[in-house]
Image (cartoon, grey):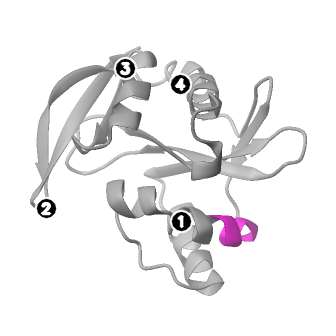
């Protein structure tokens, strides 16, 4: 995946340990905790260790989404090769203050256009209750594929043939 993407309103670039305060905030939002899960990040040091673990794993690709004009981080786009999935899992998470403004669709479209060249199929997983994510996945061209169970949790799997 290329290292930096720009859209009309956004810059999407690699996450660094300097982003620990933002990651701490994002991973403790009600939506992250409900739909992604508690990562047990309670301090900036916890967030730094979490980022270091991600950066050290070649199967994890995290990009932060920032407002172009202020460089304020507002969300993340991920591409993760999970052991229980045949293809990489595409994901996104944004701070609630930035919901409903088209930022997630704008960032996701830019990243998908780049990664589709090297990924003939991209998957996305979510829980049934995450209607906002399901709606965005469908607008991005993902189609429901199947239900997947992982660690006792039922996940909906969506597929994008690129």
Q: Residue at x 18, y 24 (%)?
A: 145
| Residue at which label 2 appears | 151
* Residue nearer the viewer, 122 or 134: 134
Mark sitting earlier along the chain (1/4): 1
Q: Distance from label 1 to label 3 (Cα)? A: 31 Å
Quarter where residue 103 is shown: top right
Q: Secondary structure at mark 4?
A: helix
- Other residues around mark 4 within 10 Å, as few (<14) / some (14–19) / many (≥20): some
- Other residues around mark 3 within 10 Å, as few (<14) / some (14–19) / many (≥20): some
Instruction: Write down the region rendered in magenta.
Output: 17-22
Q: Residue at x 79, y 41 (%)?
A: 67
| Residue at which label 4 appears | 112
Estimate the x, y position of residue 29 in percent, counting from the top left: 50, 63
**Residue 41 magenta:** no
Q: Distance from label 3 to label 4 (Cα)? A: 13 Å
* Residue nearer the viewer, 159 or 1: 159
Res 63 seen here: no
């Amino acid at each position: 995946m290329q290292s930096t993407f720009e859209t009309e309103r956004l810059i999407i670039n690699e996450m660094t340990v300097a982003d620990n305060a933002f990651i701490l905030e994002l991973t403790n939002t009600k939506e992250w905790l409900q739909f992604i899960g508690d990562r047990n990040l309670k301090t900036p040091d916890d967030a730094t260790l979490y980022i270091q673990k991600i950066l050290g794993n070649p199967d994890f690709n995290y990009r932060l989404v920032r407002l172009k004009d202020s460089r304020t981080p507002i969300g993340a786009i991920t591409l993760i090769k999970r052991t229980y999935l045949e293809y990489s899992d595409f994901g996104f998470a944004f701070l609630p203050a930035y919901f409903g403004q088209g930022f997630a669709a704008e960032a996701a479209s830019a990243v998908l256009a780049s990664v589709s060249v090297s990924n003939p199929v991209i998957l996305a997983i979510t829980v049934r209750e995450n209607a906002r994510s399901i709606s965005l996945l469908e607008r991005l061209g993902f189609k429901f594929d199947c239900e997947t169970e992982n660690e006792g949790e039922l996940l909906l799997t969506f597929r994008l043939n690129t």
